[in-house]
Amino acid sequence: MSGGRLILISALFFLSCVVSAQYHFNSQCREAYQEILNFRFEAAQNLLQKERQEHPENLIPVYLENYIDFFKLYTRENKLEFELLKGNKSKRLKLLEDGNQKSPYYRLCLAGVRIQWAFVKLKFGEYMTAAFDIRRAYLLLKENEKLFPEFLPDKVGQGILHIIVGLIPENYLWLANLVGLEGTISEGIAELNSVFLYNGSNEVYKLFKPEACFYLAFVYANLHSNKQESLEFIRRFDLDTSFIQYKNSPLIVFAKSSVYMKNGRNDEVIALLSSYQPDAETYPFLYLEFLEGLAHINRLDTSASNYFNTFLDEFKGINYIKSGHQKLAWIYLLKGDTLRYKAEIMKAKVNGHAIVDDDKQAYAEYDVGIIPALPLLKARLLFDGGYYREALNILLNTSLDQYIRSRKDLTEYTYRLGRIHHAVGNIPRAEEFYTQTIKLGKKIPHYFAANAALNLGMIYEKRGDFIGADTNYRICASLKHAEYENSLRQKAKAGLSRLKRANR
């Protein structure tokens, strides 16, 4: 063999080794990923830097670094930081596009970077470029599924995107069809569950379980009607030994707290959040302060002000500022101080943004200019905490003449009774009060009628009365109100999606 041919073969062999090593999720990268999900970003960066020095051809560090930007921007919501960091997206995509296209990680990494930046851009109002990133990610994952149908990590991104598509309102489905997006919420849940429930031996596949857990928690807390199934999700998490290293992850603490709170398990929320003790190396997730404040105010504990004040003092982002001031205003009401209530609710006008539903509702309370009736407020908070008997006692043992001052108050009164009876299993009474609420409240700009219709839809769906369920989900989606409109429509959309799947 000539020397030239030997050199050529050696060069080709070397290049093939480089290509095969371009996506190496080795133990160092797996450790960095675990540190990222535990919000120990500095430790993760050190590991990724070491990996670059030892294996400069490996592209997994590029992919993992994007997680750090994503979590920082998404949880901190700092506009200036967003402007400084968003140039990293194109740099990372350029590096990843030079990778080995025959690897299943090629499209996974490109899609993952695009999905993360789409979520961040949506938070900062860059809707058009976010939509483009979602479309590109969708096509990349769809192609990857054809090429590598058994590649489990794809299911995380696919699940997220299918859930997003499933939430698109019917009048915008033409846009999804135009760009080739399709999917359902049920399909997305199944895909995320396939990752969350993985019990095989592939160490890389196991890594994606907590990520799937986080997204499933959002679904179970916000879109799912089956409480037992959502609590079973928590039980499976607690029994799975692969999650031991994430017990103190802010993401997982948030996920579990959200599911507990949506299921009226307020004492579990407080126990979980009070036991969460991050060290100095953990990047702060300030929304947990807000969540702990909610848990305390749900049991009428006015010390909740400590948590809301910490959140408002330290958080410099966009969302939950108005809502934080509203909760402080409520605490003054619980103390009987209406003057300070008015001063605090005024801050819900001038501070923060009205983007998420909680902030819209806080602004709407200021805008209406009516101080909430204290018995209704107490019943609302106690119900949210799962203290149903105490909430019912307040409504039944306080003279209506003392606090029913308007059609809005009467609608809320019937709505609260419907929610409480529903929660304790008295379905006939719940149906009665929900029906009254819809009649009383469908023409006023409040969410009571819409949520009553949503809950009636859930009752009928569980009973197997799909026509009644469909009717009420559509009523929910059609009503106009300034409070919680987005989340209620999403839940109605999820219900219609389930009915469509059941009728196939």
Image: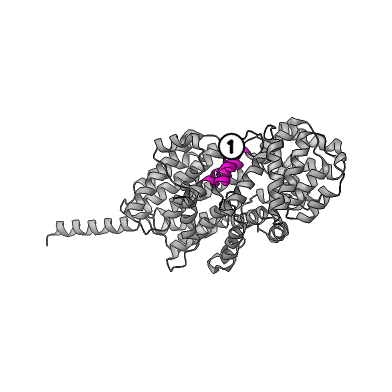
Examine the structure image and report whether residue 401 is included in the region drawn in magenta.
Answer: no
Q: In this view, does 266 lie above or below 241?
A: above
Instruction: Give the left or right position of residue 421, taking residue 342 as reference.
Output: left
Which of these two is toward me, 342 or 7?
342
Asked whether residue 88 is in view, the answer is yes
Residue 383: x %, y % from top left? 74, 51
Residue 323: x %, y % from top left? 70, 40
Q: Is residue 326 above or below residue 226?
A: above
For label 1, the residue is 79
Crowding at label 1, few (<14), some or many (≥20) Cα neighbours within 10 Å?
A: some
Q: Is residue 366 above or below residue 210?
A: above
Mark 1: amino acid: Lys
Q: Residue at 56% of width from left, 36% of height from top?
A: 124
Which of these two is toward me, 182 or 317?
182
Residue 19: x %, y % from top left? 31, 55
Instruction: Give the left or right position of residue 424, taking residue 3 as reference.
Output: right
Residue 269, image quadrant: bottom right
Q: In which quarter of the image is the N terminus?
A: bottom left
Q: Residue at 78% of width from left, 38% of height from top?
A: 409
Residue 133: x %, y % from top left? 44, 40
Examine the structure image and report whether residue 484 is included in the region drawn in magenta.
Answer: yes
Q: Residue at 82% of width from left, 45% of height from top?
A: 375
Which of these two is toward me, 40 or 174?
174
The mark total stands at: 1
Looking at the rendering, the stretch of residues picked out in magenta corresponds to 467-496
Residue 370, image quadrant: top right
Secondary structure under tag 1 reads helix
Instruction: Give the left or right position of residue 90, taking residue 362 as reference.
Output: left
